[in-house]
Image: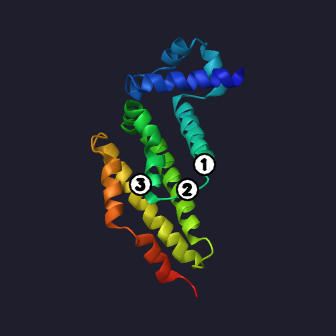
Amino acid sequence: MSGLTKKAIRDSFIKLLNEKPLNQITIRDIVDDCGVNRNTFYYYFEDLPSLLESIVNEEFDRIIKEHPTVDSIEECLDVIIDFALKNRKAALNIYRSTNRDIYEQYQWRICHHIVTTYVDGNLAGRKVSPDDRKLIIDYMTCVLFGFNTAWLNNGMVDDLQSRFHRLYELKQGELEEMIARCEIK
């Protein structure tokens, strides 16, 4: 039962985030919406930021589990923005809140993990120095994170996926070229 209660609190919070800004949501709103009492909320979460952090950590764990491999840089972006696309208003309300750092840290962790998975898949059987591997991962993580952050800053109005997919059509072969340049023979 406890997993269901925790999920009900989480779902109510996301539902409310899709309706109004984070600074207008109270614990009372959440417990009224999901039908539990305040003590039950506090049994699972210290406060609203800890609830938010729990949600982004659960999303991170879900993404890792669902994407043990990544076949393209475009897939990296699709994975990273999945939650935002499914919960557009909630993502913007979190991003525009005083708890923005929690969401940005989540986005960075997702970007880094997904890019690392993608790059390591492309490095299979090839030798590059650890410094070059890290440099490639950092570069690609920054590109993904930057595009995602700009998209959020602009209110998610652009078709980020189309723009990003087009960019990587133009940059096709870039990762392969970087790997070839730093491959240890």
- The three-letter amino acid code for the residue at tag 2 is His
Q: Is residue 125 above or below residue 158?
A: below
Q: Could you say which disc has been placed on residue 145 in the image?
A: 3
Q: Circle 3 — which element?
A: helix
Callout 1, which amino acid?
Answer: Ile
- Residue 113: give its label: 2
Please tell me which residue is depicted at 42% across the width and 55% down the height of the picture.
Answer: 74
Left or right relative to 108: residue 121: right
Q: Nearer the viewer, residue 127 or 15?
A: 127
Residue 45 x %, y %: 61, 28
Residue 82 vertical position relative to residue 22 in the rendered view, above or below: below
**Disc sitting over residue 46 in the figure:** none
Work out how far the residue at label 2 is from the one at label 1, CA to CA, in angstroms.
Answer: 8 Å
Cα–Cα span, label 1 and label 3: 17 Å
The kind of residue on which mark 3 rests is: Phe
What percent of the width, then of the height, locates residue 125? Answer: 63, 75
Q: Sequence order check: which comes first, mark 2 or mark 3?
A: 2
Colour pattern of the rendering: rainbow
| Point 55% across, 35% down: residue | 55
Q: Are marks 2 and 1 in contact (CB under 8 Å)?
A: yes
Q: Tag 1's secondary structure?
A: helix
